[in-house]
Image (spheres, rainbow, N blue to C red):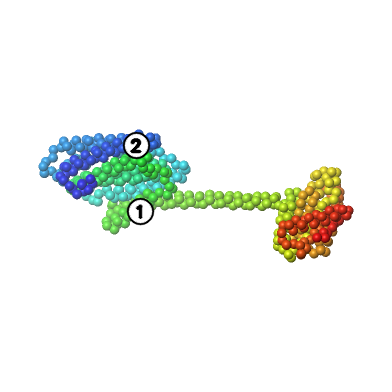
């Protein structure tokens, strides 16, 4: 239909009649589809409010179309009447039609503007309004440049052009941009873009209508106006499909980064370059310049907010990383503590039976057939039960701690001292026969000296069994470790049989 008007097909009166009949059809479709959206079960309460306002606006549009069509049909047209001779009001709208269209536009825009904005944080609201400011500044410069007459127009005509063109365009732009960038929307994203196109086309028709009629391009005016009405009908149809679950659309919350403000700034910069190149520094160019300056100012403010948000997020990330590092360090500490508890005696801090067997097995594995000198000493305390019976288990525990300290003092670096359980201790060392005997004697002497425990003098003895891994016996198996422990155990009981308080060396 737009092409029909663009090629100026047919008599102008026929074009005008077809145009306003099409307006009524498109606006009626808009009203019917908007009402269907309001009645849809899936529509939200706020969405119903917006589309109820759209329905009322469409009804007012239809009423204006009917009034205009009646005026066109009832008018007397002379046979030669064509082009500029046509009364402008019959083509662009009578006073009644204009009042009804303005009322409908105000109702529709009010529905969009009153859409509630629900932001989760104050900074999110600030980012939103800065983005709106960018779009509005860019839109103001573009619309003012497009609608402002070059020259030769009186002040009244200039003000009328600004009010009917940029004012309508800006209000519509604000309403649509708010919907497109709001956290929640009353319609799908594609619907918003279609409505934005309808708003732009209608603003062009409102601002340029009488001018196009005067210069003989009335068909272009009719085509733009018809396109605007067609886009309204298309937008409502998209929403009918969406709420009917035949097309899901895009109603998800918008991302923090919005493309629309940057598209608006890009359009303003492109217009500025084109204007300065083709027109130079004219009074219309200043609209673009100041619009670009204001939009750039909003962009800078938006980037400052984004940088502050980034810095705040980095600070929060640093805090979280520090907490994570602290948690990992605590985990490592607890893991080390648990491992220590698993392999060490809780009372004395010495290696326990499990760790002692692990060290013994590892030493045999490393030594293989050359592990001669690997010596195990099993140490059993003599008279420890009597200490517990006379002085209590508290004194007995303190005595075990002191015994462990003396045994550790007897051992060299690399030797392993362990408490196997109860009053039984063990020592693992690598030495020759003479040093092994000397070490066993030192253990007997150290344990045999009196202990001062809680003000009491306590004496115990030590029976020590010594077993050394012979070169011809150790082949690196777990059975060899068990054999060595059994040999040391047998030697320890041999020392007890010999009168306690001494050591015995296994003949293994």
Q: In this view, does 413 lie above or below 161?
A: below
In the picture, the quarter occupied by the N terminus is top left
Secondary structure at badge 1 equals helix
Q: Residue at x 11, y 44 (%)?
A: 80
Give the camera-side residue of 248 and 280: 248
Quarter holding residue 162: top left
Q: Name the residue under label 1.
A: 266
Residue 461 locus on image (x, y percent): 85, 52
Density class for disc 1 (Cα within 10 Å; few <14, some 14-19, many ≥20) is some
Q: Is residue 188 above or below residue 373?
A: above
Residue 256 in the figure: left or right of residue 284 = right
Q: Mark 2 points at which residue?
A: 37
For the residues labelled 2 and 1, the Cα–Cα distance comes to 35 Å
Q: Which residue is drawn at 76% across and 51% down?
A: 420
Residue 327 in the figure: left or right of residue 55 = right
Please tell me whether mark 2 or mark 1 is closer to you in this view.
Answer: 2
Report if residue 97 is visible in the image. no
Density class for disc 2 (Cα within 10 Å; few <14, some 14-19, many ≥20) is many
Contact flag, marks 2 and 1 (Cβ < 8 Å): no
Q: Which residue is drawn at 72% across and 52% down?
A: 354
Residue 107: give its label: none
Residue 343 locus on image (x, y percent): 71, 52
Secondary structure at badge 2 equals helix
């Amino acid at each position: 239909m737009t092409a029909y008007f663009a090629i100026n097909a047919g008599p102008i009166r026929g074009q005008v009649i077809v145009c306003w009949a099409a307006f009524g059809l498109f606006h009626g479709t808009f009203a019917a589809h908007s009402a269907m959206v309001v009645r849809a079960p899936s529509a939200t309460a706020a969405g119903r409010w917006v589309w109820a306002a759209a329905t009322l606006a469409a009804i007012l549009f239809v009423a204006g179309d009917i009034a205009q069509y009646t005026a066109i049909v009832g008018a007397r047209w002379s046979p030669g009447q064509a082009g500029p001779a046509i009364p402008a009001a019959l083509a662009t709208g009578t006073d009644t039609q204009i009042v009804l269209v303005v009322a409908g536009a105000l109702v529709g825009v009010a529905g969009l503007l009153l859409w509630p904005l629900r932001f989760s944080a104050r900074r999110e609201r600030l980012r939103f309004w800065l983005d709106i400011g960018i779009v509005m500044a860019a839109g103001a410069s573009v619309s003012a440049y497009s609608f402002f007459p070059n020259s030769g127009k009186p002040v009244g005509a200039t003000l009328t052009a600004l009010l009917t063109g940029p004012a309508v365009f800006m209000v519509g732009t604000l309403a649509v941009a708010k919907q497109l960038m709001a956290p929640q929307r009353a319609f799908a994203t594609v619907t918003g873009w279609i409505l934005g196109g309808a708003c732009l086309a209608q603003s062009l028709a409102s601002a340029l209508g009488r001018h196009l009629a005067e210069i003989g391009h009335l068909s272009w005016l009719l085509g733009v106006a018809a396109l605007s009405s067609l886009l309204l009908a298309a937008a409502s149809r998209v929403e009918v499909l969406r709420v009917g679950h035949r097309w899901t659309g895009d109603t998800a919350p918008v991302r923090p980064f919005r493309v629309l403000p940057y598209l608006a700034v890009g359009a303003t910069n492109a217009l500025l370059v084109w204007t300065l190149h083709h027109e130079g520094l004219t009074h219309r160019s200043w609209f673009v310049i100041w619009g670009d300056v204001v939009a750039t100012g909003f962009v800078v403010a938006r980037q400052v907010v984004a940088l502050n948000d980034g810095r705040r997020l980095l600070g929060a990330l640093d805090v979280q990383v520090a907490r994570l590092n602290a948690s990992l360090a605590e985990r490592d500490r607890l893991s080390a503590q648990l491992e220590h508890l698993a392999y060490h005696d809780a009372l004395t801090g010495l290696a326990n039976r499990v760790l002692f067997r692990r060290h013994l097995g590892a030493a045999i594995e490393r030594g293989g057939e050359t592990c001669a000198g690997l010596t195990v000493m099993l140490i059993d305390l003599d008279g420890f039960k009597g200490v517990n019976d006379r002085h209590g288990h508290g004194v007995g525990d303190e005595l075990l701690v002191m015994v462990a300290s003396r045994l550790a003092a007897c051992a060299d670096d690399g030797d392993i001292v362990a408490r196997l359980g109860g009053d039984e201790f063990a020592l693992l060392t690598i030495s020759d026969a003479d040093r092994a005997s000397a070490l066993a004697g030192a253990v007997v002497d150290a344990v045999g000296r009196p202990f001062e425990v809680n003000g009491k003098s306590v004496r115990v003895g030590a029976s020590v069994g010594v077993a050394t891994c012979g070169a011809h016996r150790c082949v690196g198996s777990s059975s060899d470790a068990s054999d060595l422990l059994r040999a040391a155990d047998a030697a320890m009981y041999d020392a007890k049989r010999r009168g306690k308080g001494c050591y015995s060396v296994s003949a293994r």
